[in-house]
Image (cartoon, coloured by chain):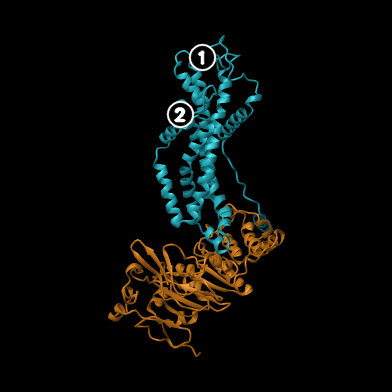
């Protein structure tokens, strides 16, 4: 549970989130803006411990307890066990450092490589992320690269320490649609090559659909549905998940189909109702929804749970 | 074939040429400052008259071939005194700003990076310091701290400039410290020290440098004002400020004694300010291109 102390009282940004991540798995975390995706991923990274933030609970990364760990302890896993790539490649590279040097850093400082070896490895990494003529690019400044290229460099820096978990916080939001697909494919490719787990945080269901094995749907800082990607897309029970799906464009729709927007806005987390946070915007909401908060319950399919009092009817599953 | 060639050509790293056009005036200013510095350093070796040599045969003379800027009321060569006088101004400017940066810049960076209690306490303290009218405080301290020397002036102005430097550097660092690349370096496992030196410092430096130049100019003015009030180096040591002060009483007889040191100071300050301003906008543009 991550709580922000704000001027208007404690703000529970993320709460009651619990999940396991398996090795070599890609997990998607989706939700609207402000649903707590970024706070969650930063909490997992252990970046959320500041003066005005209280984190409770437990985050175990390969046996390492992140919550409550000191900066010094976390520094041991940062880069080597977990790495992170950020939303905006325009700001996630140091503008006054040659890109090669930015990859070198971790190799030299953390892995103790010498200058030559680090440079060779950095060039290898640049090649791995699909930078053309990596030897020459090693010496360029971020300002000389396009957004897509920069995001590739960001990925290369994140991969330098061969992390076992890669947190990707909206890695494609700042990029052109055509580049988005390239970057996502690249992530997938690298994930397979380097045998790591990926957490893909996004508001774009299309991103999640084909590239993740499991999906978490978040709303107002809580998990409202979790399951395999197939289950969540095809057999979702939570009305919010459906609303999200209806809100994203489909190629199979006839042209000029109006997208269904979800009415209203995400709730103010400072005064959440006792009931389901989605109730005010939900067309199925009853009095019970407004008074009691539903907890996650299993659909019966292993690993697929949802939090709703009035779930959508179970859809017929293809023979398992 | 043709297309292939073109693709290859663009794929190869023809680094975009970064034209750093700073303009002619900028280089004239740089040249002028360089000239001033050289003259101040090598004044002893220049073929100019001894600034302390009094010659009662030519008192309050106008510019001539023999005395380029004329002579003062004691028959001393004004040109030579302007050159030697620049030493005081330049030393005061460099010295005081060096103190200001040596203390203010690391504190500002540290506060902006660490945030929290350390930052709020330090910033409050600095702002209280800043609320004090610096010139009045400087004058008060210098009038009691006798005998006066250039070193004391440098220390007093230098200490007074610490909160100013602190504020500028802190603000600039705050801007940088919230950028993703700093967080990225952190989750790569970089130590705080490394982040400060490798990530923050190079990105704050451009702002620091332009503020440094404008800061030197400000100190030169301040030293001039102090000298004019008779609170700087003791006569007969020349400084631009005390020459103007000496000229005050004989302005009608010998305006040259006021004009030349004023002109020297004016051009020096103008050049510094122009360079500082030019550099700032130059870096700003470069940054927005990134």
User: Could you say where residue A157 lies in the image, as x and y percent from the top left?
Assistant: 60, 63
Colour orange belongs to chain: A
**Chain letter of disc 1?**
B
Q: Quadrant of the N terminus of chain A?
A: bottom left
Q: Secondary structure at mark 2?
A: helix
Q: Most extreme residue toward the top, as rendered? A: B57
Q: Residues within 10 Å of mark 2 (few under 14, many from 20)?
A: many
> Which image quadrant is residue A217 in?
bottom left
Q: Secondary structure at mark 1?
A: loop
**Cα gap from disc 2 to disc 1, whole angstroms:** 22 Å
Residue identified by numbered label 1:
B73
Q: Which mark is residue A6?
A: none
Residue identified by numbered label 2:
B225
Please determine if labels 2 and 1 lie on a single subunit: yes
User: Could you say where residue B180 lies in the image, as x and y percent from the top left?
Assistant: 51, 59
User: Could you say where residue A212 lies in the image, as x and y percent from the top left?
Assistant: 53, 76
Q: Most extreme residue toward the left, as rendered? A: A287
Q: Earlier in the sequence, mark 2 or mark 1?
A: 1
**Image side of residue A296 versus residue A105, left or right:** left
Colour cyan belongs to chain: B
């Amino acid at each position: 549970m991550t709580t922000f102390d704000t001027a208007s009282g404690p703000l529970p940004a993320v709460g009651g989130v619990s999940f396991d991540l398996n090795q070599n798995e890609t997990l998607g975390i989706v939700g609207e803006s402000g649903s707590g995706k970024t706070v969650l991923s930063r909490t997992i990274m252990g970046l959320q411990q500041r003066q005005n933030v209280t984190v409770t609970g437990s985050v175990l990364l390969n046996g390492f307890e992140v919550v409550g760990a000191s900066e010094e302890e976390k520094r041991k896993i940062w880069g080597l066990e977990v790495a992170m790539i950020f939303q905006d490649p325009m700001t996630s590279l140091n503008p006054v450092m040659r890109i090669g040097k930015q990859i070198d850093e971790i190799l030299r400082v953390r892995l103790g490589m010498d200058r030559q070896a680090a440079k060779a490895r950095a060039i290898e990494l640049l090649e791995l992320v699909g930078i053309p003529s990596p030897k020459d690019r090693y010496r360029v400044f971020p300002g000389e690269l396009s957004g897509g290229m920069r995001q590739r460099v960001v990925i290369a820096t994140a991969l330098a320490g061969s992390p076992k978990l890669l947190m990707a916080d909206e890695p494609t939001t700042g990029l052109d649609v055509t580049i988005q697909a390239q970057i996502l494919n690249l992530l997938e490719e690298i994930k397979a090559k380097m045998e790591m787990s990926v957490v893909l945080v996004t508001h774009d269901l299309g991103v999640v659909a084909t590239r993740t094995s499991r999906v978490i749907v978040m709303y107002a800082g809580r998990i409202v549905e979790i399951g395999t990607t197939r289950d969540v897309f095809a057999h979702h029970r939570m009305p919010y998940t459906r609303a999200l799906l209806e809100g994203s464009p489909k190629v199979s729709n006839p042209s000029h189909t109006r997208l269904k927007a979800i009415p209203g806005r995400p709730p103010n987390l400072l005064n959440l109702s006792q009931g389901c946070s989605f109730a005010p915007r939900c067309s199925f909401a009853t009095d019970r929804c407004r008074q009691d908060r539903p907890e996650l319950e299993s659909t019966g399919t292993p690993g697929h749970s949802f939090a709703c009092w009035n779930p959508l009817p179970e859809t017929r599953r293809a023979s398992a | 074939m043709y297309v292939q060639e073109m693709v290859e050509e663009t794929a190869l790293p023809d680094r975009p040429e970064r034209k750093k056009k700073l303009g002619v005036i900028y280089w004239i200013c740089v040249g002028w400052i360089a000239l001033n510095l050289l003259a101040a350093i090598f004044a002893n070796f220049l073929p100019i008259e001894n600034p302390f040599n009094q010659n009662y045969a030519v008192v309050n003379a106008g510019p001539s071939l023999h005395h380029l800027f004329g002579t003062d009321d004691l028959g001393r060569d004004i040109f030579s005194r302007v050159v030697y006088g620049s030493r005081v101004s330049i030393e005061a400017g460099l010295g005081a700003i060096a103190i200001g940066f040596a203390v203010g810049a690391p504190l500002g960076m540290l506060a902006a990076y660490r945030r929290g209690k350390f930052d709020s306490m330090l910033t409050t303290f600095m702002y209280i310091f800043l609320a004090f009218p610096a010139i009045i405080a400087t004058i008060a301290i210098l009038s009691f701290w006798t005998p006066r020397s250039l070193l004391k002036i440098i220390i007093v102005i230098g200490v007074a400039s610490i909160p100013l430097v602190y504020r500028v550097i802190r603000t600039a660092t705050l801007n940088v410290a919230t950028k993703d690349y700093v967080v990225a370096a952190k989750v790569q496992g970089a130590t705080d020290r490394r982040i400060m030196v490798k990530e923050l410092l190079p990105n704050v430096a451009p702002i620091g440098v332009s503020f440094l130049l404008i800061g030197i100019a400000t100190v030169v003015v301040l030293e001039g004002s102090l000298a004019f009030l008779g609170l700087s180096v003791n006569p007969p040591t020349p400084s631009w400020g005390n020459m103007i002060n000496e000229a005050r009483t004989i302005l009608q007889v010998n305006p040259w004694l006021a004009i030349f040191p004023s002109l020297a100071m004016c051009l020096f300050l103008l050049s510094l300010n122009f360079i500082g301003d030019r550099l700032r906008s130059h870096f700003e543009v470069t940054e927005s291109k990134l």
